[in-house]
Image (tube, helix red, strand yellow):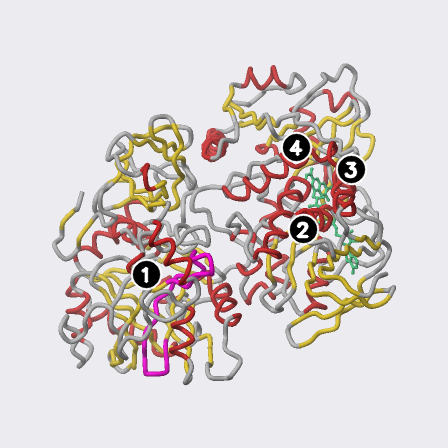
């Protein structure tokens, strides 16, 4: 084996080979793949080979769409047989909720020109005359889905990489690494040492244990996954599409005159959770017929020919699954030069082509061309280090692989991990909790006599009217919202100001006591992080970031830290609980409990101040996330219950209520505020998002300044628009709904919900600037139904100061 390479990829499955294929295609030739066995000898060789494109996230579907376009020409390019057939995929629905889901998929697919047709049961039968239509109420057909020979595709990708210079070393176990501080400098293998500049971990279900050696947390859990291969079926029609009958938890594909049939049982079986043997090469597990029967029984009803043919073989192959059902990709936060692409949750063949391209772009260009945050390794938090958490949650997610994904659905396993000090007091008052980033957060409060639980529905949910009441109280009186899950960092030291001014697009050099809303941008001038910064002292700042983005923010901050020791960064999330006091009577309430002047003159909007509330010291930011008069109280954790009790008691005569995150969502839409992860992502610049006022181009050099100056001069290409839809009943709006004008899709929705003050459905969407000029004539498609939408001239739909609806 050679003794050095620019990039070493561990793992010669489809993902490792695709990464090498795309790296070399983009011009990097000095690429090496090392596998402990033969190529494909992990999960790839025994995959069933269905290549579906539809996922719930728009950009992941686009990534899979790229796989299809690649597989369509790979055989011609490399001369290797790939078995690729664009056979189409038939999705069956036996419930009205499943129809909603199919319509949602078809609507999303339309947003980027992917064909997915809603069809009748009869049309489904015509496409696939082996199915029994009993119970089927509708279907969808995706003509460009297909099937492939997983080994053939992988060998073709490897050949493509090889032909452009990549080297592949098989039967060579990677045993360890040499490090220099945070960098991997060399890979230790059975056949010797190989130095590298960049390491890519593509070890599939071995990802977790490889992560342990690398000092990287990779929450992959291997699960058994079975499918049956039937004997040849007499008169099986040619050109059958693949089938997904998710209400029965099963899938099918045609295979040499018979069928492959598998599925996702509710009680999946984890395997080798402490580590998969390195000798597990091209192996299978023992077939488990008793376990498989729960899938086989409905399958014989849906396709009676299966029973006649009988099962020839039951394949039981393990595969890496993850606690949220999405793959794990991107730069490992714990190391400076290690990338990860593992845990493909049984869609690695479908994802492989696109995933390899995303990885190559990430490595060479610093960012993938699609924002694939749901797959980004930085989405995981410290609690994902718990193997117990990962196994329990992955088991639930495996069992829900084919079940309906309800709007606002929460999960049941591994709950109660991160609880604010107010968890129990709020529970007593009817809090209905959801989980975000491990935190239990009150979504809404069930009044006495109302069951404290969510209905799962695609129609108006049971919590709707109670959220409306919380919202009303926030507009008319005062509410308390526990926002302790905010991620907080303290940045201090003699270099702190200069450091933050280099990271942030806004001017941070403001007087002590100011609160600054800002974005951190990358060199392309697009958004990496959205935060507020409170200047607590000349050299001390409190940074507040959304709950789920702490890991990403801290990665960005730490990656840009000066080496001279002049800046010290400390995460303070657990140190401060946060109570948000919101509403026109919030000032009166707070004033009852403090000697500090909290009037507008004494405590202006956009400033911060230290004072006491009751017996407790607090730092308060005079900002809110919802656009009402309000105060965020940052309270040393042990004082939080006391502050809450004091506010609650003093607020009785002011009509105080508790409110939850669903009220926040409704109010912040009416205020026109944008959200990190939805509107604010590396795909968009602050100018696209209407946040040009947060870009201080007059200040000295900062990251992204040149690009932002150019965007400002040339003009933003996109505009973040607010649409309202007047409908007879509130709509459960889906994400990524197409916005249509004169029959043409101009953009897709990013956030949406119901504005309880303006009594309309609200959607945000980016539109090309030149297309965002009319007021009427737009349409938004939701679950295949088209609604007229109005483009509002103002992003702010309600002005609390004047109590006026601005539309
Ligand atoms: C039964 C079954 C059916 C499936 N059906 C489908 C399907 O129809 N469609 C679909 O899209 N997906 C399907 N999948 C999923 C798909 O097989 C996987 O997602 C995909 O193969 C993962 O590819 P990978 O490259 O990430 O991992 P792998 O193929 O597992 O490759 C990882 C490689 O890393 C190597 N490695 C690990 N540790 C080391 C080490 N220390 N040193 C050197 N090398 C190492 C291994 O030898 C292995 O070759 C199925 C999976 C199973 C189990």
Look at the image and give the residue range highlighted in magenta.
Answer: 519-541
Looking at the image, residue 221 lies above or below residue 215: above
Q: Percent x, y for residue 522?
A: 46, 61
The majority secondary structure of the magenta stretch comes to strand
Task: State the SS at label 4.
Answer: strand
Q: Percent x, y for residue 677?
A: 44, 53
Q: Distance from label 1 to label 4 (Cα)?
A: 45 Å
Residue annotated with mark 2: 27
Mark 4 C-beta to ligand 1 under 8 Å: yes
Task: Report if residue 539 lies within the magenta region.
Answer: yes
- Camera-near label (1 vs 4) is 4
Q: Distance from label 1 to label 3 (Cα)?
A: 59 Å
200 relative position to 584: left or right: right
* Earlier residue among tags 4 and 3: 3
Q: Distance from label 2 to label 3 (Cα)?
A: 24 Å
Q: Is disc 4 in contact with disc 3, using a CB cutoff of under 8 Å? A: no
Residue annotated with mark 1: 429
* Earlier residue among tags 2 and 4: 2
At 73% from the left edge and 35% from the top edge, which residue is drawn?
Answer: 77
Residue annotated with mark 3: 152
Judging depth in this view, the residue of 254 and 192 nearest the camera is 192
Quadrant, the C terminus: top left
717 relative position to 550: left or right: left
Q: Distance from label 1 to label 2 (Cα)?
A: 61 Å
């Amino acid at each position: 084996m050679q003794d050095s390479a620019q990039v070493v990829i561990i793992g010669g499955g489809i993902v490792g080979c695709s990464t090498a294929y795309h790296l070399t295609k983009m011009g990097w030739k000095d690429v090496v793949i090392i596998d402990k066995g033969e190529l494909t000898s992990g999960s790839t060789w025994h995959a069933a080979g269905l290549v579906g494109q539809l996922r719930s996230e728009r950009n992941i579907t686009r990534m899979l769409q790229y796989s299809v376009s690649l597989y369509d020409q790979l055989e011609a390019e490399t001369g290797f047989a790939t078995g690729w057939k664009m056979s189409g995929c038939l999705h069956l629905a036996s419930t009205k909720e499943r129809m909603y889901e199919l319509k949602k998929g078809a609507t999303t697919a339309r947003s980027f020109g992917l064909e997915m047709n809603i069809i009748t049961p009869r049309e489904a039968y015509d496409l696939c005359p082996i199915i029994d239509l009993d119970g089927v109420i509708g279907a969808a057909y995706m003509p460009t889905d297909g099937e492939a020979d997983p080994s053939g595709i992988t060998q073709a990708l490897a050949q493509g990489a090889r032909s452009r210079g990549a080297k592949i070393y098989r039967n060579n176990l990677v045993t360890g690494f040499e490090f220099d501080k945070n960098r991997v400098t060399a890979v230790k293998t059975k056949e010797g040492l190989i130095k590298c500049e960049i390491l890519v971990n593509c070890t599939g279900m071995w990802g977790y244990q490889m992560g342990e050696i690398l000092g990287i947390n990779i929450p992959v859990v291997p699960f058994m996954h079975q499918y049956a291969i039937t004997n040849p079926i007499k008169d099986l029609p040619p050109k059958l599409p693949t089938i997904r009958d998710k209400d029965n938890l099963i899938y099918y594909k045609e295979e040499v005159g018979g069928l492959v049939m598998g599925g996702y049982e509710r009680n999946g079986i984890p395997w080798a959770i402490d580590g998969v043997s390195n000798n597990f090469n091209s192996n299978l597990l023992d077939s488990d017929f008793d376990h498989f029967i729960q899938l086989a029984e409905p399958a014989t009803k849906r396709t009676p020919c299966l029973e006649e043919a009988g099962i020839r073989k039951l394949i039981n192959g393990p595969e890496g699954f993850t606690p949220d059902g999405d793959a794990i990709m991107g730069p490992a936060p714990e190391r400076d030069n290690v990338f990860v692409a593992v845990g493909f949750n049984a869609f690695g063949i479908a994802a492989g082509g696109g995933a390899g391209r995303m990885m190559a772009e990430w490595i060479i260009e610093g960012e993938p061309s699609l924002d694939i945050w749901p797959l980004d390794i930085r989405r995981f938090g410290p609690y994902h280090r718990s193997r117990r958490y990962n196994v329990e949650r992955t088991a639930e997610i495996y069992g829900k692989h084919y079940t309906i994904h309800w709007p606002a659905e929460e999960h049941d396993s591994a709950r109660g991990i991160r609880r604010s000090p107010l968890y129990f007091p709020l529970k007593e008052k009817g809090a209905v909790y959801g989980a975000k980033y491990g935190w239990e957060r009150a979504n809404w409060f069930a009044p006495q006599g109302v069951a404290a639980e969510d209905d799962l529905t695609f129609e108006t949910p049971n919590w709707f009217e109670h959220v409306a009441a919380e919202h009303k109280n926030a507009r008319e009186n005062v509410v308390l919202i526990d926002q302790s899950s905010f991620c907080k960092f303290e940045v201090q030291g003699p270099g702190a100001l200069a450091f933050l001014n280099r990271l942030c697009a806004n001017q941070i050099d403001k007087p002590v006591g100011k609160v600054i809303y800002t974005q951190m941008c990358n060199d392309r001038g697009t958004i990496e992080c959205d935060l507020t910064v409170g200047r607590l002292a000349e050299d001390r700042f409190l940074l507040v970031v959304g709950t789920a983005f702490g890991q990403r923010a801290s990665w960005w901050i730490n990656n840009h830290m000066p080496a001279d020791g002049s800046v010290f960064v400390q995460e303070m999330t657990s140190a401060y609980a946060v109570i948000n006091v919101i509403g026109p009577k919030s000032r009166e309430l707070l004033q009852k409990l403090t000697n500090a002047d909290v009037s507008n003159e004494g405590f202006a909007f956009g400033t911060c101040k230290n004072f006491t509330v009751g017996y407790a010291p607090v730092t308060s930011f005079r900002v809110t996330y919802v656009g009402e008069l309000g105060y965020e109280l940052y309270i040393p954790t042990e004082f939080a219950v006391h502050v809450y009790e004091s506010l609650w008691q003093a607020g009785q005569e002011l009509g105080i209520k508790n409110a939850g995150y669903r009220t926040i969502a409704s109010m912040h839409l009416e205020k026109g505020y944008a959200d990190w992860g939805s509107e604010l992502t590396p795909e968009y610049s602050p100018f696209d998002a209407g946040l040009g006022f947060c870009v201080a181009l007059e200040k000295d050099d900062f990251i992204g300044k040149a690009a932002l100056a150019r965007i400002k001069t040339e003009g933003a290409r996109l505009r973040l628009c607010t649409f309202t839809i007047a409908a007879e009943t509130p709509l459960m709006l889906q994400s990524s709904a197409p916005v249509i004008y004169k029959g043409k899709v101009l953009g897709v929705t990013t956030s949406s919900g119901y504005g309880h003050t303006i009594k309309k459905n609200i959607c945000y969407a980016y539109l090309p600037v030149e297309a965002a000029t009319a007021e009427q004539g737009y349409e938004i498609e939701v679950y295949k139904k088209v609604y007229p939408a109005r483009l509002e001239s103002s992003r702010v739909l309600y002005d609390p100061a004047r109590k006026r609806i601005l539309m």
